[in-house]
Image: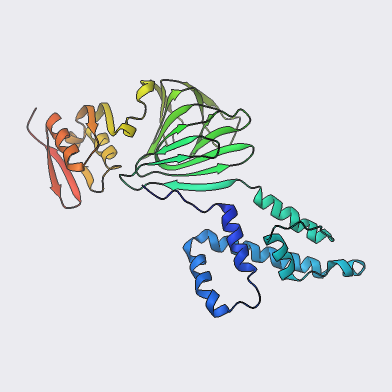
């Protein structure tokens, strides 16, 4: 399981500001290696530091250009105003430029708190959000969460996750899936985004899938418990299927459930869980249909079970597993 401790944007800003306001007497040769290491640890660190540096130059220029009548109150050493903001002390602005500075920092620190989470192949992770909502990440999944006073937004980059959303009518909860957006208030549902395919299955409550993530007025498809929305990325077409609400996320119990799907789809699903790539050697084998439940433990055991159900032979070849035509069962 991956480490869920992440750097929030506020923490990143404070760290960048800390480097920018280091005391004048600090030994540069001692601080430089640590500062360089921090800059290179995450590309966003350098971007944030550069933003602060640009803000410093802009405010310094504004203060230097203050009218003569305000000269007595507008002389603020660059280190001084940065230190004041960094220590978060109460500061009464005496110039328009200083007021702008305060507003800028207030806006920054009230911006949505964005956090990212991910799992590697074969890993699961459970995340509890500040509002009490739960997100269960399946294997090979990446998403980001943005929380503010007015909204709760998730962007699912890839993979699969089950959501248990805490009810909060004043703050809607949405999940962005490329060009689509799933909107809820309080409910439980599972989303899969993999290989160009999208699936949204509702366990309880009501959700709606908006056909465009960029417009609140875009057409929306309403889903109730037991509904599953199926579509492909880049296509406006979709279908609604019926599923057992109590079994929309069998992966959380270590199972994969298939109902009359081609073997190629089974192989694609298994490739989300194991490091070795499963390939099917020809089209006739890829088209074989499979229905059943596979317990997800070690890869060899899973494939041997599949081999026992279907007319295939499993061949392990280094980092690849090849499924070929075998004897009829």
Residue 19 lies in quadrant: bottom right
Residue 237 lies in quadrant: top left
The colour scheme used to paint the residues is rainbow
Image coordinates for residue 193, horizontal then vertical, percent = 40, 38
- Relative depth, front residue between 194 and 202: 202
Image coordinates for residue 232, horizontal then vertical, percent = 40, 34
Q: Which residue is at 68% across, 60% downward? A: 87
Instruction: Judge from the rendering whether residue 143 lies leftward or rightward of residue 148; answer left or right.
Output: left
Q: Is residue 310 visible?
A: no
Q: Which residue is at 70% across, 57% downward? A: 88
Instruction: Tell me: residue 54, above or below residue 133.
Output: below
- Relative depth, front residue between 303 and 214: 303
Instruction: Judge from the rendering whether residue 265 lies leftward or rightward of residue 81; answer left or right.
Output: left
- Quadrant of the snapshot with the C terminus: top left
Q: Is residue 207 visible?
A: yes
Mark count: 0
Instruction: Judge from the rendering whether residue 117 lies leftward or rightward of residue 323; answer left or right.
Output: right
Instruction: Judge from the rendering whether residue 255 lies leftward or rightward of residue 87; answer left or right.
Output: left
- Relative depth, front residue between 23 and 171: 23
Q: Which residue is at 21% across, 32% downward? A: 287
Identify the residue at the far left of this view. 327
Image coordinates for residue 176, horizontal then vertical, percent = 50, 38
Image coordinates for residue 58, horizontal then vertical, percent = 73, 65
Q: Which residue is at 67% across, 65% downward? A: 54
Residue 11 lies in quadrant: bottom right
């Amino acid at each position: 399981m991956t480490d869920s401790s992440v750097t929030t944007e506020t923490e990143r800003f404070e760290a960048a500001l800390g480097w920018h306001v280091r005391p004048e007497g600090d030994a540069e040769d001692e601080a430089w290696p640590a500062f360089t290491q921090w800059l290179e640890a995450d590309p966003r660190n350098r971007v944030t530091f550069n933003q602060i540096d640009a803000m410093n130059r802009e405010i310094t220029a504004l203060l230097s250009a203050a009218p003569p009548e305000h000269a007595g109150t507008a002389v603020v050493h660059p280190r001084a105003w940065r230190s004041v903001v960094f220590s978060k002390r109460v500061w009464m602005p005496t110039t328009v430029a200083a007021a702008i500075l305060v507003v800028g920092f207030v806006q920054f620190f009230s911006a949505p708190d964005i956090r990212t989470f991910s799992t590697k192949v074969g890993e699961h992770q459970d995340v509890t959000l500040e509002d009490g909502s739960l997100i269960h990440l399946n294997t090979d999944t990446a998403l980001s969460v943005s929380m503010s006073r007015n909204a709760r937004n998730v962007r699912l980059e890839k993979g699969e996750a089950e959501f248990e959303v805490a009810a909060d009518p004043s703050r809607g909860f949405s999940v962005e899936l490329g060009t689509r957006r799933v909107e809820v208030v309080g409910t439980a549902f599972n989303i899969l985004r993999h290989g160009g395919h999208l699936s949204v299955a509702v366990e309880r409550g009501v959700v709606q899938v908006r056909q465009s993530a960029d417009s609140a007025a875009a057409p929306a498809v309403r889903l109730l418990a037991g509904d599953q929305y199926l579509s492909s990325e880049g296509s406006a077409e979709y279908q609604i299927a019926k599923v057992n609400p109590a079994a929309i996320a069998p992966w959380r119990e270590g199972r994969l459930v298939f109902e009359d799907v081609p073997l190629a789809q089974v192989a694609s699903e298994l490739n989300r869980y194991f490091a070795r790539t499963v390939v099917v050697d020809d089209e006739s084998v890829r088209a074989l249909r499979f229905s059943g439940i596979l317990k997800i433990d070690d890869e060899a055991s899973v494939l041997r079970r599949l081999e026992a159900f279907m007319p295939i032979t499993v061949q392990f070849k280094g980092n690849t597993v090849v499924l070929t035509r075998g004897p009829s069962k």
